[in-house]
């Protein structure tokens, strides 16, 4: 999926997150999606992979990757996921 939560309200993003997790659990398949909603990524992803202009700069558990200084500098600016 490519940015499935783009343009959605907070309530719609929450519904989408539940839908994605339900499909993943019900079908037992891996899912790959491109997403810029870091709260959604942190909440439901098992693993993340971060690219900066096609260069891999991080991969692993969301809580670890989203707090990596290189990832923050390149992608998240100074904002961090709570």
Image (cartoon, rainbow, N blue to C red):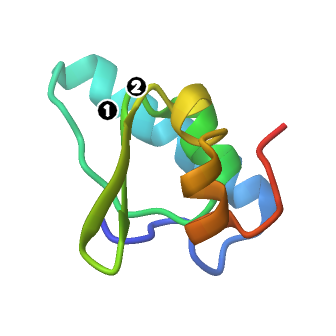
How many residues crowd mark 1 within 10 Å: few (<14), some (14–19), many (20+)?
Answer: few
Q: Which mark is residue 46?
A: 2
Q: Which residue is mark 1?
A: 23
Q: Which mark is residue 70?
A: none
Tell me where residue 65 appears, x and y as whole percent. 52, 37
Tell me where residue 79 appears, x and y as whole percent. 82, 59
Give the residue drawn at x 56%, y 54%: 70
Q: Nearer the viewer, residue 72 or 28?
A: 72
Quarter of the picture holding the N terminus: bottom left
Give the residue drawn at x 66%, y 57%: 72
Q: Is residue 49 visible?
A: no
| Left or right, residue 7 beside residue 49 | right
Q: Quadrant of residue 42?
A: top right
Q: Is residue 63 above or below residue 33?
A: above
Find the distance from the CA under tag 2 to the CA under tag 1: 14 Å
Q: Nearer the viewer, residue 44 or 11?
A: 44
Tell me where residue 11 appears, x and y as whole percent. 78, 54
Q: Nearer the viewer, residue 11 or 36?
A: 36
Element on which disc 2 rests:
loop
Tell me where residue 28 appears, x and y as whole percent. 18, 19
Quarter of the picture holding the C terminus: top right
Q: Nearer the viewer, residue 72 or 46?
A: 72
Give the residue drawn at x 55%, y 44%: 41
Q: Is residue 65 above or below residue 7?
A: above
Q: Looking at the image, is mark 2 or mark 1 earlier in the sequence?
A: 1
Q: Is residue 48 above or below residue 54?
A: above
| Left or right, residue 22 beside residue 76 | left
How many residues crowd mark 2 within 10 Å: few (<14), some (14–19), many (20+)?
Answer: few
Give the residue drawn at x 55%, y 35%: 18
């Amino acid at each position: 999926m490519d940015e499935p939560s783009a343009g959605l309200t907070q309530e719609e993003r929450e519904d989408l997150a539940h839908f994605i997790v339900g499909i993943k659990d019900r079908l037992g398949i891996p899912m790959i999606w491109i997403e810029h909603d870091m709260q959604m990524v942190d909440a439901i992803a098992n693993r993340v992979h971060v690219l900066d202009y096609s260069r891999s700069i991080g991969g692993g558990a969301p809580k670890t990757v989203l707090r990596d200084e290189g990832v923050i500098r390149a992608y998240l600016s100074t904002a961090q996921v709570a």
